[in-house]
Amino acid sequence: AQRVTQPEKLLSVFKGAPVELKCNYSYSGSPELFWYVQYSRQRLQLLLRHISRESIKGFTADLNKGETSFHLKKPFAQEEDSAMYYCALIKPNAGKSTFGDGTTLTVKP
Amino acid sequence: EAGVTQFPSHSVIEKGQTVTLRCDPISGHDNLYWYRRVMGKEIKFLLHFVKESKQDESGMPNNRFLAERTGGTYSTLKVQPAELEDSGVYFCASSQDFTEAFFGQGTRLTVV
């Protein structure tokens, strides 16, 4: 069975500092990996997905199949990045997502 | 375009009562999912509809939970009778294909 692990429940950084939210997964095939974000009082929304290889709001995430990781990075954190971040995995052609526990990121001024 | 809508946003019920949650997906999305986040834990999959059919209901915790999707449009999730451990946030999501899912704002259920 697939599993997603986010080892940090809470992460706090100062504005302008680099930030990395860790995500490891276990799945025997080639999954699709996503990062979702939930800002205060807003709905869960897609931040980025590994297949698009894009940078959203300054965030990037690289799929490392050797380490089975999909860490989310941003070189200079902003206060508006404070939110709950979820890493998720989808089996190809399955649809349902397997989520990690989530990491609450706080960016201090 | 309207997003995924869930109703109610909050519900407080007593143990043993029945509660029905509703989800209106994005128009044209065949795939509809229910997830649940229990306090402090991860978002867990409950079930997946493709149009009106249950594609995967492996995450449904027990037979107190019943999900329906009438005519392949909106979906309801009924909990009967509710227990204390059913408290949490219930999310609905819809997608056009098997990738990006669009989430509703969630229904916070509190069973007292």
Image (cartoon, coloured by chain):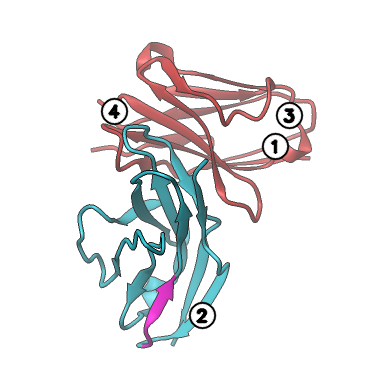
Chain colours: A cyan, B red
Given residues A86 and A1, the one toward you in this image is: A1
Crowding around mark 2 (Cα neighbors within 10 Å: few <14, some 14 to 19, many 20+) is few
Given residues A52 and B20, the one toward you in this image is: A52
Mark 3 lies on a secondary structure that is loop
Q: Which residue is mark 2?
A: A12
Where in the figure is residue B42, as x and y percent of width and height? Answer: 57, 51
**Mark 2 vs mark 1, CA separation in Å:** 31 Å
Would residue B14 be visible to someone looking at this image? yes
Q: Residue at x 68, y 25 (%)?
A: B62
In the displayed structure, would residue B12 be above or below residue A60?
above
Crowding around mark 4 (Cα neighbors within 10 Å: few <14, some 14 to 19, many 20+) is some
Q: Are marks 4 and 1 on the same chain?
A: yes
Crowding around mark 1 (Cα neighbors within 10 Å: few <14, some 14 to 19, many 20+) is many
Question: Label 1 sits on what residue type?
Answer: Asp
Q: Which residue is mark 1?
A: B86
Query: The magenta stretch spans which residues?
Result: A17-21
| Chain letter for the residue marked with disc 1 in the picture | B
Badge number at residue B29 = 4
**Mark 3 vs mark 2, CA separation in Å:** 37 Å
Contact flag, marks 3 and 2 (Cβ < 8 Å): no
Magenta highlight on residue B94: no
| Chain letter for the residue marked with disc 2 in the picture | A
**Mark 2 vs mark 4, CA separation in Å:** 37 Å
**Mark 4 vs mark 3, CA separation in Å:** 30 Å
Q: Which residue is mark 3?
A: B82
Q: Quadrant of residue B51?
A: top left
Badge number at residue B100 = none
Total numbered labels placed on residues in the image = 4
| Chain letter for the residue marked with disc 3 in the picture | B
